[in-house]
Image (tube, coloured by chain):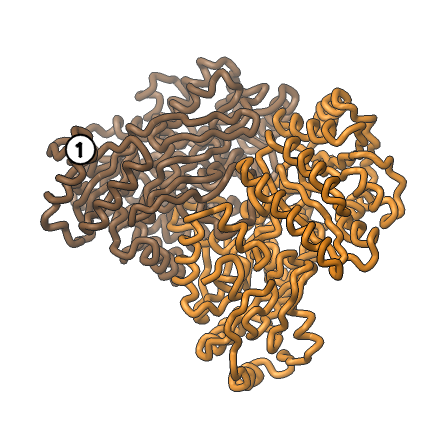
Chain colours: A brown, B orange
Amino acid sequence: MATPLTQVVDIDPTLTQLRELLGERLTTSKAICERHGRDESYHPGAPPQAVVYPRSTEEVSTIASICAAARVPMIAYGTGTSLEGHVAALAGGVCVDMMQMNEIVKVNAEDLDVVVQPGVTRKQLNTHLRDTGLFFPIDPGADASLGGMTATRASGTNAVRYGTMREAVLALTVVLADGRVIRTGRRARKSAAGYDLTRLFVGSEGTLGIITEITLRVHGIPEAISSAVCAFDTLEGAVNTVIMTIQSGVPVARIELLDEVQIDAVNHYSGLSLTVAPTLFLEFHGSEASVAEQAQTVGALAADEGGREFAWTSNVEERTTLWQARHDAAYAAKAARPGGQLWATDVCVPISRLAECILETRRDVDESRLFAPIVGHVGDGNFHLALVVDPDDAEEVARTKALNERLIMRALAMEGTCTGEHGIGYGKLEFLHAEHGEAVAVMRTVKQALDPHNLMNPGKVVNV
Amino acid sequence: MATPLTQVVDIDPTLTQLRELLGERLTTSKAICERHGRDESYHPGAPPQAVVYPRSTEEVSTIASICAAARVPMIAYGTGTSLEGHVAALAGGVCVDMMQMNEIVKVNAEDLDVVVQPGVTRKQLNTHLRDTGLFFPIDPGADASLGGMTATRASGTNAVRYGTMREAVLALTVVLADGRVIRTGRRARKSAAGYDLTRLFVGSEGTLGIITEITLRVHGIPEAISSAVCAFDTLEGAVNTVIMTIQSGVPVARIELLDEVQIDAVNHYSGLSLTVAPTLFLEFHGSEASVAEQAQTVGALAADEGGREFAWTSNVEERTTLWQARHDAAYAAKAARPGGQLWATDVCVPISRLAECILETRRDVDESRLFAPIVGHVGDGNFHLALVVDPDDAEEVARTKALNERLIMRALAMEGTCTGEHGIGYGKLEFLHAEHGEAVAVMRTVKQALDPHNLMNPGKVVNV
């Protein structure tokens, strides 16, 4: 439920000032505000009182100064694909839609980095990079904005090899709550110069400032890429194969688990005819020789665990179909229960505990009589239940909530985290406390120091 | 020069309380205090008024509570191998020597992580890990404590492949300025749960809290390791080989540059007979096939740039000799000018600017008539001048200072950093400003919020 925060009483003078700056790039349209106040999750939305569309860091800075002077909240917005209510305007205020700042500012091919505005999406970047031999690996499924991905510390299928947004971001330009503009780093690969402000803003979910420019690491497109699908007799066999692959140090680029419920949904949604069984989707990157070596190693591990033969492809179209199906897994789950609402869980545990965590969870799902396909970036120890819930069935919602809580507590007991990649938003405030204890007080201290009037996406990550 | 900070007037009541807690693990011996107030750099030291030796997080917490109540500064201390005056007790106070907290708490071999106390050194950890098939790659040369390495965001020769302490640290236990104890993360590989406090404390140089436990990623010892030495006709050829190696995506584990001045010093100090020419030291990790493939690629690049044939070895003893010589480079430089003092610079630039930066710097060194071997972790764009200066020659000191300033400004103009791995200490306060501008104000805000009385290593990183 939305935390009750004080609403701005009279926003009109502020909107007048903002309209002078932005003209038609400010709207109070009810429909547009509604759309900007909710994300793809089951969490109730809350519309902002206006939406603005800045086109430069300077404009964002001026917007922040105007809002700060009148104590009006600001909520940065990208593609609205978050999953924990991140964009809900819990205290009203102005939604700052960053999607008109969608310029790829610079490609430093020789240094394997790029400079982008926050409204650039990951697919837009990769299309732009195509001719350079470079690519940006981080891939949360949705074609999210890079600003949003930075703000939520996103990861996804390639993180097992290439890391998350934490590793990908070299430097940021950020507009602070009072309108000041800072640059958090430079383009050197490493630096020991002062506090790591870059990493402080990565994952801060718009609560410490608004990101207006991002310097990102990119990678050379590997010489060889091949994808494979492998069905298993048991869920346990599939998970054990993952664990041994990671422990053997195979630099697998993607290793994704879909249980039989998820495979069935994917077959229907994406028109595939995969064997309905616990399945791994894999991808190998490297030289021809290295890709072959990796595949051989994983193939042998899978065979020992009841894995059937790899169905291979290095054909680009077939690979795209496969990974599009993987990315559509949540939509496929939703389509399997028309009218239902997606409720995605997101725990991540140390790899040694993964089998135990997934198998216990699977039993719990079965006992809970809920529709909850399992899908996940298992190479990182991260997996999701793509629950689809009837929002009008209070009892089912209660059972779902209880299942999610048990799952999180199970992961925490295994030294894991309540969220591998979705973030806290306002949906996981209580679990942040369960996970971090006294450290949440330190987060709150940082928040209060940088945003003393609680104007930046209030009510998210930490309550102040 | 040491920033003048207010000294504690009467520390005796505090020492009485601390002595009750620690007994003989508190000393006010002048010699010991002197030794704890200075590091391996040319920066003037400043002795603390006492040194304490805690043995647990709880003791550190109690020490912090006692010191905080009396407004007594606390300076965490490891092996004293820092290079920017990090440990100087500029405002007096108590040095907290962490070296009795040297337990390896847990090896989670299946998860490729370990939990250690901060006084464990990197060599101690690797000796302990030897039988597990794992190793900890980060290697700044000195056998530093892992607490100190975390606090300074250390890196070193393997960072080009395995990252720096920023990537290696999964979680920390930290005692705050008021004695509170927090845990910044868990053992999951990734998490999107709240602000990244782990990264905030990595590189904070003891100014935000005292690190009392560290969870670190470790890696499987590669199947094959081979090292090589390659001399070049020109400095430019050596640097270009580095640039092309990195840009080709070869996952080289180490690629280190030593210019002919440095090679000459190393030959004398370590009893080697390397060709006196600009030289790369390399190491390749991987499967037998992959190591061979990497070496072939780099060999071809080197040949095009005037590199002579690789002198190879996969013999453990020979490799150890080679890398020990590399690690002793600074001591070798110092030995080449008896009575001189080491003055190590530490810029890091984007790889595309590396040749330009090194060649301009080399010209500048020659014109400055200074003894300044070049040595560095060039795969990251990071290189050092291992200047050796006559401390009694004010004019030479002035020339050195001016050279260092020009070098830093050159690196900043190339979008680089004033310090790749040594940190700020109190030696680079002004350069932090030159590099980060308004962002330093944000660092100061964070410092003031977490340490309002400026008790944690005062006068370092940011002046408050």
- Say which of B313 and B452 sits in front: B452
- In the image: residue B320, left or right of residue B349: right
Amino acid type at mark 1? Leu
At 43% from the left and 65% from the top, the residue drawn is B451
At 77% from the left and 36% from the top, the residue drawn is B227
- In the image: residue A152, left or right of residue B302: left
At 66% from the left and 69% from the top, the residue drawn is B36
- Say which of A66 and B196 sits in front: A66
Residue where numbered disc 1 is placed? A26
Query: In the image as oriented, which residue stretches furthest toward the front?
Result: B395
Q: Please give the count of numbered marks on the rendered protein.
A: 1
Tag 1's secondary structure? Answer: strand
Where is residue A14 drawn, in percent x and y? 15, 44
Quadrant of res A12: top left
Where is residue A381 drawn, in percent x and y? 47, 42
The chain holding disc 1 is A
Relative to residue B58, is residue A326 depicted above or below?
above
The image quadrant where one finds the C terminus of chain A is bottom left
Determine if residue B9 is in view: yes
- Say which of B293 and A130 sits in front: A130
Where is residue B399 drawn, in percent x and y? 69, 50
Quadrant of res B101: bottom right
